[in-house]
Image (cartoon, rainbow, N blue to C red):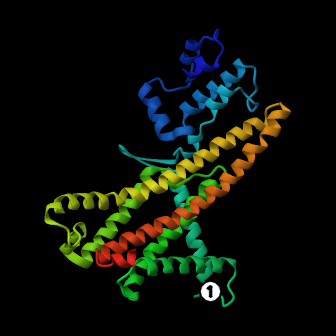
Amino acid sequence: RQANLVLPPAYDVTWFCNQFLGVDSFKDLKDTFVDLHFKGRESLTWNTGFVNFYNEIWRAEDSPPGSAVSAPNQLFLENPLDQFAIYPIIDLHVGNFYFTFTNAVLYMLLTVVLVVFLFFVVTKKGGGKSVPNAWQSLVELIYDFVLNLVNEQIGGLSGNVKQKFFPRISVTFTFSLFRNPQGMIPFSFTVTSHFLITLALSFSIFIGITIVGFQRHGLHFFSFLLPAGVPLPLAPFLVLLELISYCFRALSLGIRLFANMMAGHSLVKILSGFAWTMLFLNNIFYFIGDLGPLFIVLALTGLELGVAISQAHVSTISICIYLNDATNLHQNESFHN
């Protein structure tokens, strides 16, 4: 279908599709899909198939690779969602099991290494300096910021009990703070743009908060689903609504982060591609008109960077609020308001 849209009408598309995978490709269709699925752009199928296809399009339109092509070709060659593709780096096959080290795992490990290295450098001699440098000031700022959030959002607990929650909340905030803006770096990867990853994080937090609620209140934790003073006829409906609302907390954390990261990065990619295409068209009017989209891209880049950082703040506040509800039930609603 793409070939019929792009190539000239007289071109024999059927012949080319028959030769699409080349003479060295897999003879079995199943092996071809397995190769493409597990190896992605590193696979033989991708390299011999899609690369040949692009070259054939360029030859058909007498355009050398790397030159400005027509609008249909540009839309076909550039996809804003390509930046979210997960591809394997190392394949490990153990029997019928596949353990793949992907780019998503790589960037999560890089985030962990960066955070651990930063805190190690600041505290390697048993503490910070009396006159802090820039890195120590950053660590102290993160520490004070998260500590204030815990003290302000979680009420009805002593300082010692709050300190038990502080390390876990601090790790979550720091990891999100360094992980979300990674996608703004060219040729990098946004880990939190995938719903399964954010959903796994939100579900683990949800399960942990529920366990804390049962540890603190036992079976009395179920009273969270029915506030005091509710008329008896409304109790079944209110319990159902509260149960649905409570369970959706596990989804809300993941959906909010995933939607903000994916939508913002896609918008920046689309407008950047539009500005880049106008910049290389051989027309002075297009070049002058490109200044508008270019400034919009720069503004959106700064906005998206702020959104990436603020999402760490919003997620941490939500976790503190959910933790406050689990530890205080309905006893502390005045504090919450």
Q: Is residue 297 left or right of residue 243?
A: right
Mark 1 neighbour density, 10 Å: few (under 14) some (14–19) many (20 or more): some
Note whether residue 37 is visible. yes
Q: Position of residue 93 (x, y in %)?
A: 42, 46
Q: Which residue occupies 44% across, 50% down?
A: 195
Question: In this figure, which residue is indicated by the disc labeled 1?
Answer: 128
Which quadrant would the N terminus be assigned to in this image? top right
Q: Position of residue 302 (x, y in %)?
A: 67, 57
**Farthest residue in the right direction?**
284
Q: Position of residue 226 (x, y in %)?
A: 21, 68
Q: Is residue 128 left or right of residue 162?
A: right
Q: Position of residue 181 (x, y in %)?
A: 60, 59
Looking at the image, residue 94 lies above or below residue 170: above
Note whether residue 110 is visible. no
Q: Secondary structure at mark 1?
A: loop
Identity, as a three-letter code, of the amino acid under mark 1: Gly
Instruction: State the residue in front, 90 or 112.
Output: 112
Instruction: State the residue in front, 52 or 31.
Output: 52
Instruction: State the residue in front, 41 or 311.
Output: 311
Q: Is residue 69 left or right of residue 255?
A: right
